[in-house]
Image: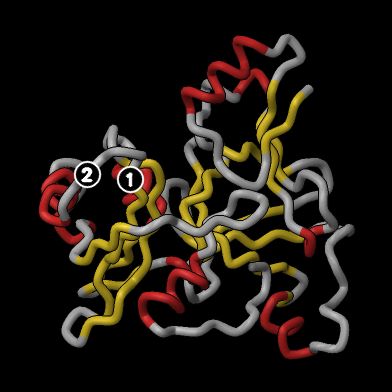
Amino acid sequence: MRQSCAQPVPFDIMKKLVETLPCGVSNIYGITEGGGGGLFNLYPEDVLRKPGSIGKPTFGVEAKIVDFEGGKLPAGEVGELLFTTDRMMKEYHGNPEMTADTIKAGWLCTGDLLKTDDEGYYYIVDRMKDMITSGGENIYPVEIEDALMDHPDIEDVACIGYPDDRLVEIVMAVVQLKAGASMTESELIEFAKSKMATYKVPRKVIFDPVPRSATGKVMKPLIREKYTGRREAFKKLD
């Protein structure tokens, strides 16, 4: 069996993997603070039936999605993922404040925003620290990035919140075009308007390479520092 983790795999690529590999493909979710390994598992028989899902909690893991007040949310509502298991960490060594902020009443707060469907399958929506608040609306950058990636001339994209005096934040898109392609800010915005609600459309566009780590993750703290001057200290579960 082959396992996918860390970054979401586009459906068309996952479909090719399933059709090509006879051993089967599963999707897992895990974090170091949870003891490593798969805290959630989407088994091969569900990979194409539940695209984008990380599956359900594995044996010995209890999970829930809560609102900002800690109340448990029903299926379809987006909130923070909390889980508890015997194998999760005890503490951050030498950092009791971060430990207290991360583990509350025996539940580990992941900082990840998820939702479930009616069958109890979990889906990652975004990171809490990446969520954009604009004019009272909560905006999830991943949704915008996925939509913009449908444009044939876009190689990569990352969206962040850009400070705004009136709306608190506006959506800013850092867009990396494919070799030889060209596009203007207005063209990108018009394309975005055809794909999403108006309040989600980027109001600021920068055409620049999107920085990624050695493991392929978008380096959003670096992007925020470069374009907004907002330098971020180390945060839990980054």
Q: Which colour scheme appears in the figure?
A: secondary structure
- Say which label, 1 or 2, has the lower sequence index: 1
* Residue under the point 32% across and 62% down: 139
Seen from this angle, which residue lies furthest front? 180
Please state which of residues 10 and 184 is positioned toward the viewer in this rendering: 184
The answer to whether any part of residue 136 appears in the image is: yes
> Left of 31 or right of it: where is 191?
left
The answer to whether any part of residue 140 appears in the image is: no
* Residue under the point 66% across and 34% down: 27
* Residue under the point 77% across and 71% down: 106
* Residue under the point 53% across and 18% down: 15
Q: Which mark is residue 182?
A: 2
> Is 6 rendered above or below residue 13?
below
Image quadrant for the N terminus? top right
Q: Which mark is residue 152?
A: none
> Left of 186 or right of it: where is 85?
right
Q: Amino acid at mark 2?
A: Ser
Q: In this figure, which residue is indicated by the disc labeled 1?
A: 177
Are the residues at dot 1 and dot 2 in contact (C-beta closer than 8 Å)? yes
Q: Amino acid at mark 1?
A: Leu
